Image (spheres, grey):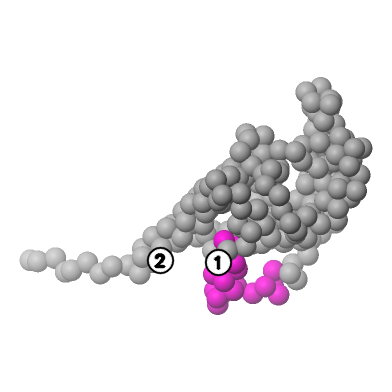
Amino acid sequence: MPRPPQVADPHDGRRIALIVEFAVLFIAAPLLMRYAIFEHHVPLFYALPPVLGLMIILLFTDTSFRLKRELMRLFSFSTFYSILILFAIGAAIVVYAMAKLMPDRLFALAAERPGKWAQIMVLYPFTSVLAQELVYRVFFFHRYGPLFKSRWTLIAANALVFGFGHIIFRNWIAVGATVIGGALFAWRYERSRSFWAVWVEHVLWGWLVFTVGLGVFFFTGVANPSW
């Protein structure tokens, strides 16, 4: 007796489309931005908006996404306490490591260029962290979460692509540090589902990076007119 014809599962097509989209946005795009920055000296803040804009369009045309719902999710005192405790421990480790391994860089920016340091402290949370967390946590988890079968594979994938996105800085410290930071931020967001919780945590760690002297590893060297 002949077998009935197989009917294509529409979910398979959707999954394949998401995988291709994921590869384009989180693998191909950082590679293209790296090429544009270092081969054609395009400032980062000029190379980034097209990619960010496409992600925002995809997010806001998704009928299951509600920005208001995301922004209304605050976080508990216990979450805030956890953020502070982990940051205090991590900050002590980072400062100690800098004092031992790179003592000439420790607090160098704040001491030598206090105006630039203050500018970064003010602008960084709003010009960088907001965009990064919207893309790498809100957008990533909402759109690509269904591709992963467990919370830990989702967190690991998010950490890896977050680190990979920092290849534009062309040094292993930026990539390695952001893989670790990405794992922390992904874990925080997966637990709390609060954009604000992960934004606060990311801001604290970013401030630490630029204060202790690691910020030099997070510049492309191509002049950015907006900073």
Q: Please state which amino acid type lies under the numbered disc 1.
A: Leu
In the rendered image, which residue does mark 1 sit on? 54
Left or right for 44, reference 110: left
In the rendered image, which residue does mark 2 sit on? 14
Magenta segment main secondary structure: helix
Q: Quadrant of the C terminus?
A: bottom right
Q: Nearer the viewer, residue 162 or 74?
A: 162
Q: Quadrant of residue 10?
A: bottom left
Residue 113: % across, % down: 89, 42
Span highlighted in magenta in the image: 51-70
Mark 2 touches mark 1? (CB < 8 Å)? no
For marks 2 and 1, give the one nearer the viewer.
Answer: 1
Any magenta on residue 197?
no
Q: Quadrant of the N terminus?
A: bottom left
Q: Please state which amino acid type lies under the numbered disc 2.
A: Arg
Q: Secondary structure at mark 2?
A: helix
Decide if residue 73 is in sight here. Answer: yes
Q: Nearer the viewer, residue 133 or 220?
A: 220
Residue 165: % across, % down: 59, 48
Residue sitting at x 41%, y 63%: 17
Decide if residue 148 is in sight here. Answer: no
Residue sitting at x 61%, y 38%: 170
Any magenta on residue 66?
yes
Residue 225 to residue 67: above or below: above
Give the class, few, some or many, for how many residues have Cα within 10 Å of label 2's Cα (few <14, many ≥20).
Answer: few
